Image (cartoon, rainbow, N blue to C red):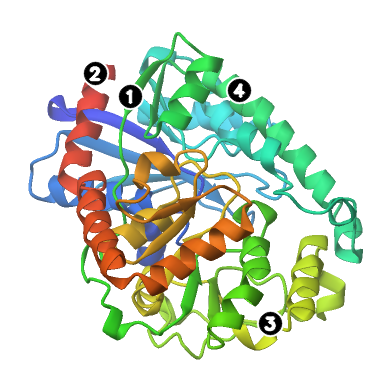
Amino acid sequence: MQGKGNHMKVLWLCNIMLPAFARHEGIEYTNREGWLSGSFDKISAQRKMGKCDIDLAVCFPVPEHEKWDKKEVDGVVFYAFHEDLNTPEVYKPELETRFQEIISDYDPDVVHIFGTEFPHSLAMIKAFGKPERTLLGIQGLCTAIANEYMADLPENVRKDATLRDRLKNDSLMEQQAKFRLRGENEINMIKLAGHITGRTSFDREAVLAINPEAKYHYMNETMREDFYEGTWKEADAVPHSIFLSQGDYPLKGFHFILQALPALIEKYPDTHVYVAGNSIIGGIDRKTVTVPNENGVQIKGSRYPLFMRISAYGKYLKILIAKGHLKNNVTILGKLSAAQMKEQYLKASVFVCPSIIENSPNSVGEAMLLGVPTVASRTGGIPSMLDDGRDGILFEPGDVKGLTEAILQIWEEKVITDVYCENARAHARMTHDADINYARLLEIYHALG
């Protein structure tokens, strides 16, 4: 069965509104899941040149006040559905009904589901009911996240619950329990999907342990276009500046960097950490962000005082900052666009991914593409992306001393660091080659359709 003119009809299910659609509609969008834009832009460009035999439809969750069901933009059909993304641990059977409507309207040959993090993925697998033509893309793994969620936090922090945590039923213990529930949904998805894409030995082993019958397809991700241009140069970087792509929950390991800072500052008093993403410790400072916001987006502060909205993890970060006298050495930048992220990578003397668990973090791929000196945890799928001692330095997750030594090595052994940067860039250009990844995606679609 094929779409019009022997074209194959593929339906995507995404966790977020695609930036291409949001820009067309003039609405704010998130830069999370940058590989979606990478793949979408490539398919769109090839379609416009008449070189692509894929007809694409995309469905994604929209806020309750959005009342549309279906729109067409540049030959791509977009479908909306409503889902409370604040309760991703709760399975919502009513989504199956909405997805059945979308499936009967579009009549896809293949359904490609991006990610296992939300219950809508399970609802789509059930609604479509054709495992042999269902492709489930692994992003993060909720089961692994649940197991590692506390990220070596002290017992008293794990059990702490602030006013915000109690009002939202969202303490660290409750957050971990929610990830366990999400993990149960994820296991069901993996059991029901006939075909699965992944890109690391970590996700391959995890998936095949749950469903040995599934056909595993190896497929790398294409990053957003911004990161394929430009190269890190030491002369343009701010000495002893450290960049983190996020730090708003324990998994991301911001606390490890704060624990490493006193020793780094002792040796290099100008050491400074810049963190992108949500701030859970109050003030955002964007003085170093010179690239303007996209779509005139305003970065607004909260109307509630910090004591009312701080989480137990945020409180712990504040304690570490106070204890280490780090207030003047830490800057939270807030949410950044791709162009703004790129500016920060290129300004940093080192990019650090201190996460306790990751599958294949975009940030590591982006930093490597730009040739930024990179230090990351040896965890999950990261060793499949970055060769330790060749592309950068890996340290044992949670090992603050190892993290400190790795950063110092980057700063002090500049000749080796330059070699890391060149190797990382060359490695990432193969991993994230848009043409190769696009050809691989079509190959997988045709194998299913």
Quarter of the image with the N terminus in it = top left
Q: Secondary structure at mark 2?
A: helix
Asked if residue 59 lies left or right of residue 167, the reply is left
Sequence-first disc among 3 and 4? 4
Asked if residue 261 lies left or right of residue 419, the reply is right
Instruction: Please name the residue that numbered disc 3 is placed on.
Output: 326
Who is closer to the viewer here, 182 or 23? 182
Instruction: Please name the residue that numbered disc 4 is placed on.
Output: 187
Query: Residue 159 location in percent, x, y?
Result: 90, 51
Tell me which residue sits at (13%, 47%) in the image: 46
The answer to whether mark 1 and mark 2 are in CB contact below 8 A is: yes
- Specify few, some or many for label 3: CA neighbours under 10 Å numbering under 14, 14-19, or 20 or more: some
Who is closer to the viewer here, 212 or 390? 390
**What's the CA distance linking mark 3 and mark 1?**
46 Å
Q: Amino acid at mark 2?
A: Ala
Instruction: Please name the residue that numbered disc 2 is placed on.
Output: 447
Q: Secondary structure at mark 1?
A: strand
**What's the CA distance linking mark 4 and mark 1?**
18 Å
**What's the CA distance linking mark 3 and mark 4?**
42 Å
